[in-house]
Image (spheres, rainbow, N blue to C red):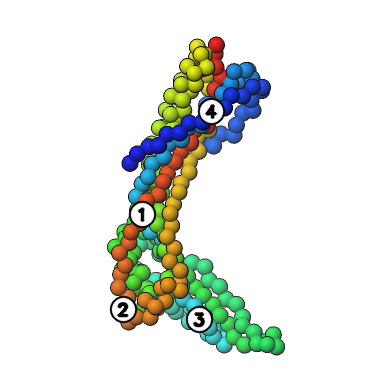
Amino acid sequence: MKNILTGKAAFATGTACLMTMLMGTAHAAPTGYDQLAFQTEVKEEIQNDEVTASLYKKAQATDAKALATTLNTSINNALKIAKRYPTVTVSTGQQRTYPRYDKYNKIIGWTGQANIDLKSTDFTATSQLIADLQETLVMENLSFGVSDIKKNALQQKLMTDASRAFQQQAKNMTRAWDARSYRVVNVNLNTGSNYPRPMYNAMSMKAESADASVPSQNFESGNSTISVTANGTIELTK
């Protein structure tokens, strides 16, 4: 893993406004003279360790009650199957029901869709569960990301790195402007993430779900980039 450091500086005069503090704050009373505003950023690429997926059952019926029975039965059966995989978090997702009309604008039936959502850091179990569910459900999407525990731990580290980078840049700017020292007027610490999320649409998965037995899929989760920026203003002392 490599940290990437960038720095930007701009010279400003006039009274400085205090910035809204997001995650970290440092204050000094500004005088409005010899102030520099700049930003530093640190980044780290990290392997995705969490997979999320959504599958659905879509059905039609002549009346709403029959449709609800079909959808509920299908989702209930899916939840029973999911209980075999305790390392996968399963929840019922969104459900939609809407009428179908004939050319005379008369209701002739109902169409509905019910979803089930999966989330886990156990890729093997999730892959097998998806394969089991695809015998009756259709895949809607599949994506990868960084779990909260792993992301929060990295962000804490990067916040420290960004703070140190800001201080180092402040020292560099002080020397560049032939100043004796500096004091911090304000500093903001902001986090950011870049998650490549490969999506698998329902159309591409229908052919597989039609098989009597769906094989499990090997996952390639890819990487995400977590970043923290430190931007603020310092005042130079001549």
> Most extreme residue toward the right, as rendered?
104
Is 131 left, or right, of 169 in this rendering? left
Which of labels 1 and 3 is toward the front? 1
Q: Which residue lies at the image location 48% right of the left edge and 43% below the top edge? A: 192
Q: Earlier in the sequence, mark 4 or mark 1?
A: 4
Determine which quarter of the picture holds residue 119.
bottom left
Residue designated by label 3? 59
Sequence-wise first label, 1 or 3: 3
Q: Which residue is mark 2?
A: 213
Label 3 packing within 10 angstroms: few (<14), some (14-19), many (20+): some
Viewer-side residue, 147 vs 173: 173
Residue type of the residue flagged with mark 4: Ala
User: Image point 49% across, 18% down: which residue?
Assistant: 176
Residue 70 in the image: state x and y as whole percent: 48, 82
Residue ID for mark 1: 222
For marks 3 and 4, give the CA distance.
Answer: 59 Å
State the mark number for residue 9: 4
Q: Nearer the viewer, mark 3 or mark 4?
A: 4
| Distance between the alpha carbons at the discs numbered 4 and 1 | 34 Å
Label 3 sits on a secondary structure element that is strand
